[in-house]
Image: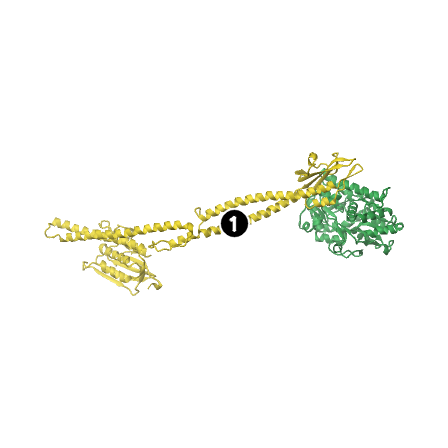
Amino acid sequence: MTRNDSSLFTRLAVLVSLVLCVGATALAIAAWYYARAAADDAYDRVLKGAALQMADSLTVDGGEMIVDLPASAFELLGLAERDRLFYRIVDPEGKTLTGYADLANGSDLSAVRSEPIVQNGSYSGDPVRIVVVARAFSDPALSGWAHVIVAQTTEARRALAAELTTRAVLLVLIMSVMALAGTALAIRYALRPVWRLGAALNSRDSQDLKPIEVDMPREMRPFVGSINHFMGRLERRVSQLERFIADAAHQIRTPLTALTAQVDLLGQDKLGAGARQHLERVQQRAEELARLTNQLLSHAMVIHRADAVRLAPVNLVDIARRAFRAAVPITLSPDIIVSFEADESDPKVLGDAVSLREAIVNVIDNALRHGTLSRLEVKVSSEAGNAVIEVEDDGPGIPREAWESVTQRFATPKQNGGTAGLGFSIAAEVASAHGGTLGFRERNERGFVVVLKLPLLTGEGD
Amino acid sequence: MRHLIFLLVLFMSAPATAQAIGKKPVIFPALSTASATLDIHAATDLPAMEPLLRDFQQAAPDITINYFEYVTNDLYKAADEACRAGHPIGDILLSSSVDQLMKLANDGCAGAHRSPETKRTARWANWRDEVFGFTYEPSIFVYDSRMVPPEDVPRSHADLAELLRRRIDFYRGRIGTYDIRLSGIGYLLAYSDARQTTTVYGRLLESMSRADVVTRCCNSEILELITGGQLYIGYNILGSYAYAAMLKNPHLRIVVPQDYTLVLRRGALISKDAPNLAAAKRFLDYLLSERGQRVSREKAFFFAEDGTLPKGVDGPETLKESGVARPIRIGPSLLAAQDQAQRLRFIADWADVLFGSARRPDDPPK
């Protein structure tokens, strides 16, 4: 799966991660607040309990307040094992009876008479939690409010809050990771039909324009429907084009044949030398036109067939021989020696017989027209997994620098030849549609060779 | 070395001047080139500590030790004043009166120390990584076997109270214990006794009062009086000192009370902003280490949490498993003992019961 910016997976994953991050952070902060509140609440109860216990231990004896601090109160405070504790006991007259005289010195003690007050403060440089409780005495000798102030450092609270927060954060993290992993799996699962659709489209034959029939989730159906609709339009258009090509061939060939016949009927003897010359020109041009028309149709047909015809195993020697016969005209000058030669390898290729024949015809035709002086040889053989068709002539050949350009349309080896050739172009198209190549071999003393190579049919192709 | 022994003999022979000793240290020069000094201010008898100090110097030969000896209350007073003034009296404080060390730590006079050794310490012997208990010392009875016949030997606190009532004429003026007005550890033991059992403690106190109990600042003095034949029975004597005395005077006998036995952990505390912090930490680690504990058990304090009682001690085989051990937990509850009003009143009640003119025999001090 590619993860670039336009990947659906990345978009979804990033978005979900962001939401999870924000959510996890919010939860962690909330956990911290709750943990602090819970820790404070728990230890405040202990603190209050201890202070009330101390207040309860105060007695009045003979007009004097007696302090008999219960060790249990200190044990209670000792539940916060590491915390230092400070206390002060104040009698009704405001005098400190025992404890740390400077603890919460300035505070207004009268405010706590209804219920104990717990607040934050600091003592001897450390943050502390301070509780103040009051107890009323109504002894005839001593009456009024006595106060007990107890303070405790906050280590245990902080430790508890930290522990609770850590645990909560750990849970949130585990949850987030699970959610993220689940999302990733879900996204992959949800996107699988898209890949399946792509694979189904890719694995189709190029000529297969039938509607796609893949099992798709409901959300994907409009998309598939659009593709099928589009393919239907394309198919109609392709068949229209095929009809048009057939029509055009028919429409152009018929008047052209008629034209040629008419020109042939013109009696040459009755014409003057100048007119005869013109007539010959007309004949020549008509012939070129016919050839060009044939080539255009042939080219269109080859291109169409490359997309539309299912390839089948064919015997290349047969095709080449038929092409050879078709390409060498009966009217060929007897001075020219032509030969066809096939070795015993009997090469077979997977191909379209019509296109291949057309390609070979065009190569031979080209050689006869522009190359051959006195000799043309066609050889079919096979070598290293390829079927090879060589067309050799004793003409001047094509210079190396022109090899590339001659396979393009309307290029010709002769600058002034007057005929725009599609021959090599057709052959090259066919070769590449069959996974082969059209090449040339440098002119040597024997001649110039055009080489058409096609991959041999392997294995069970018969 | 000879000087030292001379000094030691001098100090041991004059324990009454304990407070004066606190001003001048006993110096243990470094065994190799001195690179650090360590000031130990201790309410612990030097003979008990000396094997530990010497063994520590074997492990740390570059440290010179200055040992200042106090009684518990003087050490607390000095340390408290120094802490308020903002400059510590020494690097490390050792005291059997752990409640006083607790109070110092609670007031912010201690520095924390964490190390693998401190982690090994039991929870009830470590507060805030500031106060550490490094010994295991039962509070026991000592008697002179030449004077106390076997049938009289008390095996519990109730036994002792009963014995003093039964043979009051024989034991009058012959029983000694801490003077809790002078000794912090004496106060801590008495306070813990009172919390263990109000009635038995009250009865015992009242019996001791009628038997004209002799009170002294320190264990060493009581032990000396027993050795010298002036006293027959010592109550609330720390097992470690008593055992050391017993090794020297075979007629001394030790009884671990079978109803309950208070067990004290002698405390160590590193002063806040100690000038020789590294040396203090090394010494504390040594005290808590296996090696230090072994030396402590074999040569210095004789009792250990795990293991049997030392030879010749009358009591259960192992203190911990017998269930009679009542360890004085190093924790905030000791701060109740250190409340000044409480302390004053407790000591006043104690003195009132023991020496007061208006004796109230059936009225426990608390």
Which residue of the protein is positioned furthest toward the right in this rendering? B169
Position of the C terminus of chain B by quadrant? top right
Q: Residues within 10 Å of mark 1 (few under 14, many from 20)?
A: some
Q: Is residue B230 left or right of A161 when viewed as pictured?
A: right
Taking the image as shown, residue A165 lies to the left or right of residue B140, namely left
- Residue denoted by label 1: A179
Q: Amino acid at mark 1?
A: Ala
The shade of chain B is green
Q: How is the image coloured?
A: by chain
User: What x and y, as percent, mark residue B50?
Assistant: 76, 50
Judging from the image, what secondary structure is the residue with disc 1 in? Answer: helix
Q: Chain of mark 1?
A: A
- Residue A406 appears in the rendering: no
- Kindly indicate which chain is depicted in yellow in the rendered structure: A
Q: Is residue A298 visible?
A: yes
- How far across and how far down the image is residue A353, in percent? 28, 59
